Amino acid sequence: MTTTSDQSVSPTSTSAAVTAGAHATEIARKGLSNQRGGSATVDQQRAATVIGAALEGIRAAIRDHKVTYEEFDAFKQWLIAVSDTGEWPLFLDVYLEFEVEKVAAATQQGSVGTILGPFWLDGQAQLDSPATLPMRDDEPGTPMILAGQVTATDGTPLAGAKVDIWHTDSDGWYSGFAAKPPAGNLRGVVRCDDQGRFEIHTRKPAPYTIPLDGPTGQMTQAAGWSPWRPAHIHLLVTAPGHRTLTSQLFFTGDPYLGNDVASADKPELTLDPQPTGNASPGFEGEVRSDRDFVLEPE
Ligand code: DHB
Ligand code: FE
């Protein structure tokens, strides 16, 4: 299958899927050591229970739908392609991470979270609030302010809180994974003030399709599913002694809300940015959203 889309075709000769996939694999190999445990030890009984249930799910699909040898061989080829393109982190975060997040959320207090996804990067600009994210001089898109306060579940403002934020540019490209935006574009770790308050100046992101030229996108299109994610801002909100909140924020009126390929959107996570009245020549008027975050003590 050959597919092209403005969202997925990289300007280099390497396909977008291979570029994004390989880098996401490299990041995933490190196990996000400073955010989540990279490896779990699993006892034999749990391995047998969970792995057994997963395999039985696949065997049931084979039995119930009378899967042929041709289809089984196509499945093998597809799995090999997911490895060859480095798309395992993309595939797993789109089609499975939301279920893991639901399990984690069942025992989490504080603000609603959602999936991390494959595009977080370590080592980004450390900024003090109020902060403007690193961006090009002529960074396109609607200027946007995201502001709020980080508190503990008992209401105490968290002075040491940080908001690690990353999102696409207004064309739907992530820096570090697509050729267009420069390294570090629209990514940063913002330190809150002594009242846990933050104010972040950025550009509104755009809806994003998973890369369409790799096996994850091809499978998605073969099944006739939408490859789109609604526009979103990723966040990791941290504070010493508190459980990290992994979340995303979406936008009212986005045509892909409720039909997110990664099933990560939640009604509690929708922003409705309002005009501030500020305008720079050549840009749409600036908008602002206020959003507070509540972290659970560790
Ligand atoms: C994918 C992309 C995202 O922006 C995201 O948040 C989750 C998954 C992906 O392409 O796999
Ligand atoms: Fe994303």
Image (cartoon, rainbow, N blue to C red):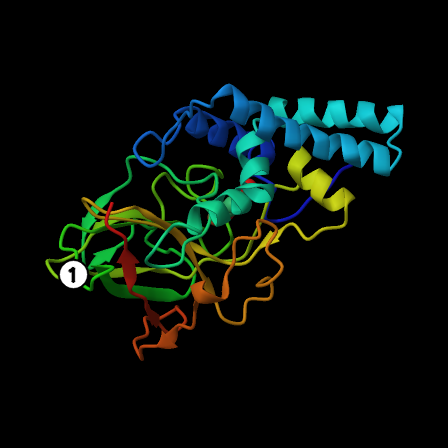
Q: Amino acid at mark 1?
A: Pro
Mark yes or no: residue 123 visible.
Answer: yes
Residue at x-position 42% and y-position 26%: 40
Residue at x-position 57% and y-position 36%: 92
Q: Which is more toward the observer, 115 or 53?
A: 53
Q: Residue furthest front?
A: 45
Percent x, y for residue 130?
19, 60
Percent x, y for residue 178?
49, 39
Residue 245 placement, left or right of 61: left
In the rendered image, the vertical position of residue 134 relative to residue 33, given as above or below: below
Residue 135 placement, left or right of 297: right
Percent x, y for residue 138?
36, 56
Q: Residue furthest left?
A: 194
Percent x, y for residue 253?
54, 72
On-image quarter of the C terminus: top left
Query: Where on the picture, by quarter, is residue 3?
Result: top right
Which residue was labeled with disc 1? 157
Secondary element type, mark 1: loop
On-image quarter of the N terminus: top right
In the rendered image, the vertical position of residue 278 relative to residue 58, given as above or below: below
Query: Where on the picture, by quarter, is residue 51?
Result: top right
Classed neighbour count for the residue bearing mark 1: other residues with Cα under 10 Å, few (<14), some (14–19), many (≥20) = some
Mark yes or no: residue 214 visible.
Answer: no
